[in-house]
Image: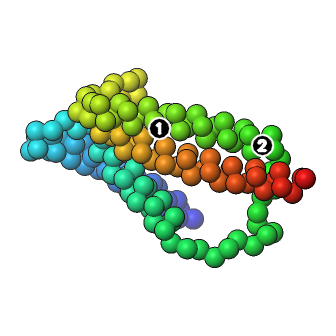
């Protein structure tokens, strides 16, 4: 029993050390990128820009690859009011994505600061692409689903 507690303590200690090393590596990579390229980078840029580009690529790939039709028992039934609420949320996300696209295109190297950190315009551009693409896809799916509900109810 004592040996098990000791092993658990060592595992937790190793996990915290790995987290500390990861944070230090991200900070040093940010500073090295800024120093060697001369371009401004922040930690948010280093984390979110590649992540959003990867998510955009995976989203496009999932749209291009044909999948099997889903079984009818797995389709979630929603009311028209619920679909309208999802549509409003998708539209607001689209507006946020379009704003991010606009700000990222007009000022790609401008630093946008906030309470929780700072990011540059090119990161806003990639996040805007991700948000607007995702929200357009969701709005189209909801519109098709709403049309199906209206056809069924008639």
The kind of secondary structure element at disc 1 is helix
Going by the image, does 59 lie left or right of 83?
left
Residue at 50% across, 72% down: 65
Q: Marks 2 and 1: CB-CB under 8 Å? A: no
Is residue 23 left or right of 32 when viewed as pictured?
Answer: right
Q: Can see residue 10?
A: no
Q: Which residue is mark 2?
A: 82
Q: Nearer the viewer, residue 35 or 103?
A: 103
Residue 83 seen:
yes
Give the side of residue 120 with respect to residue 127, left or right. Answer: left
Residue drawn at x 26%, y 35% is: 108
Looking at the rendering, in which quadrant would you find the N terminus? bottom right
* Residue wearing tag 1: 97
The percent position of residue 58, horizontal first and vertical second, equals 44, 62
Q: Residues within 10 Å of mark 2 (few under 14, many from 20)?
A: few
Above or below, 120 relative to 58: above
CA separation in Å, label 2 and label 1? 23 Å
């Amino acid at each position: 029993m004592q040996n098990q507690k000791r092993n658990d303590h060592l595992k937790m200690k190793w996990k915290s050390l790995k987290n500390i090393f990861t944070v230090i590596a991200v900070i040093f990579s940010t500073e090295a990128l800024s120093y060697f390229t001369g371009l401004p980078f922040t930690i948010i840029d280093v984390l979110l820009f590649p992540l959003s580009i990867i998510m955009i690529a995976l989203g496009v790939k999932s749209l291009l690859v044909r999948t099997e039709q889903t079984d009818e028992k797995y389709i979630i039934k929603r009311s028209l009011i619920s679909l309208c609420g999802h549509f409003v949320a998708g539209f607001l996300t689209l507006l946020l994505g379009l704003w991010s696209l606009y700000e990222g295109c007009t000022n790609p190297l401008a630093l946008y600061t906030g309470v929780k950190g700072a990011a540059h315009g090119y990161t806003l551009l990639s996040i805007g692409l991700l948000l607007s693409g995702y929200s357009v896809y969701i709005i189209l799916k909801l519109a098709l689903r709403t049309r199906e509900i209206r056809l069924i109810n008639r």
